[in-house]
Amino acid sequence: MKDKVVKYIKETVVELKKVTWPSKQELIGSTIVTIFVSLVLAIFIFLVDQGLSNLMALVLS
């Protein structure tokens, strides 16, 4: 069991060394885009929800 764990960790380290990690600028840029898109989507969902709520209130009254 111990041998399998050690082998797994060694293989994981080897694979992590093969990864091309993003630069700091790429990471910051991707983070900004992700936050912006999330905010736009949240605002859109909020507006649709408010519109449907108002429509349901109008229909049910």
Image: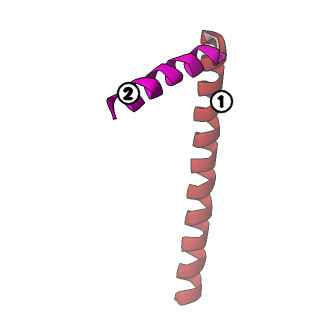
Q: Is residue 21 visible?
A: no
**In front of the other: 24 or 11:** 11
Q: Is residue 51 visible?
A: yes
Coloration mode: secondary structure
Q: Which amino acid, mark 2? A: Asp
Query: Which corner quadrant of the image does residue 37 belong to?
Result: top right
Q: Which residues are magenta?
A: 1-21
Image x and y of residue 47, in percent: 60, 58
Residue at (45% x, 25% y) in the render: 7
Residue at (39% x, 24% y) in the render: 6
Residue behind mark 2: 3
Image x and y of residue 45, in percent: 59, 57
Side of 56 relative to 37 (left or right): left
Residue behind mark 1: 33
Image x and y of residue 44, in percent: 63, 53
In magenta stretch: residue 3: yes
Q: Which amino acid, mark 1? A: Val
**In front of the other: 53 or 30:** 30
Q: Quadrant of the N terminus?
A: top left
Image x and y of residue 38, in percent: 59, 41
